[in-house]
């Protein structure tokens, strides 16, 4: 897992903290769940360059 930083408006931060408390989740867990939900709205685009790099590296 990677650490990251982000800037949120105060109202958005407060709303996310409220959801976290209501669900007994950490704020990090709320952010991960939100990001996982968000990416389902965008189809994954194949990246032929990444496949070529993996083949060359033997992975």
Image (cartoon, rainbow, N blue to C red):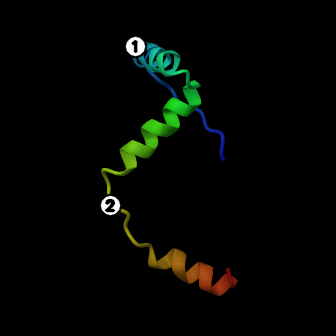
Circle 1 residue? 11
Q: Which mark is residue 43?
A: 2
Q: Is residue 38 above or below residue 10?
A: below
- Camera-nearest residue between 24 and 42: 24
Q: Label 2 vs label 1: CA separation?
A: 30 Å
Q: Is residue 12 left or right of residue 50?
A: left
Furthest residue to the front?
A: 23
Up-down relation of residue 26 to residue 38 (above or below): above
In the image, residue 15 above or below residue 48: above
Asked which quadrant contains residue 54, the reply is: bottom right
Give the mark nearest the N terminus, 2 or 1.
Answer: 1
Rendering coords of residue 57 (x, y %): 68, 82
Count of numbered tags: 2
State the residue at coordinates (58%, 31%): 28
Q: Quadrant of residue 11?
A: top left
Residue drawn at (66%, 47%) of the image: 1
The residue lying at 53 percent from left, 79 percent from top is: 51
The one nearer the camera, 50 or 26, is 26
SS class, disc 1:
helix
Q: Is residue 18 left or right of residue 26?
A: left
List x then y, in percent, for residue 49: 50, 77
Residue 45's spot in the image, x, y percent? 37, 67
36 vs 15: above or below? below
Where does residue 40 sit, x and y in percent of width and height? 35, 51
């Amino acid at each position: 897992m990677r650490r990251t930083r982000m800037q949120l408006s105060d109202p958005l931060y407060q709303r996310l903290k409220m959801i976290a408390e209501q669900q007994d989740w950490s704020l990090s867990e709320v952010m991960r769940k939100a990001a996982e939900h968000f990416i389902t709205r965008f189809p994954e685009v194949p990246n032929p360059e990444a496949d070529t790099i993996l083949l060359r590296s033997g992975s």
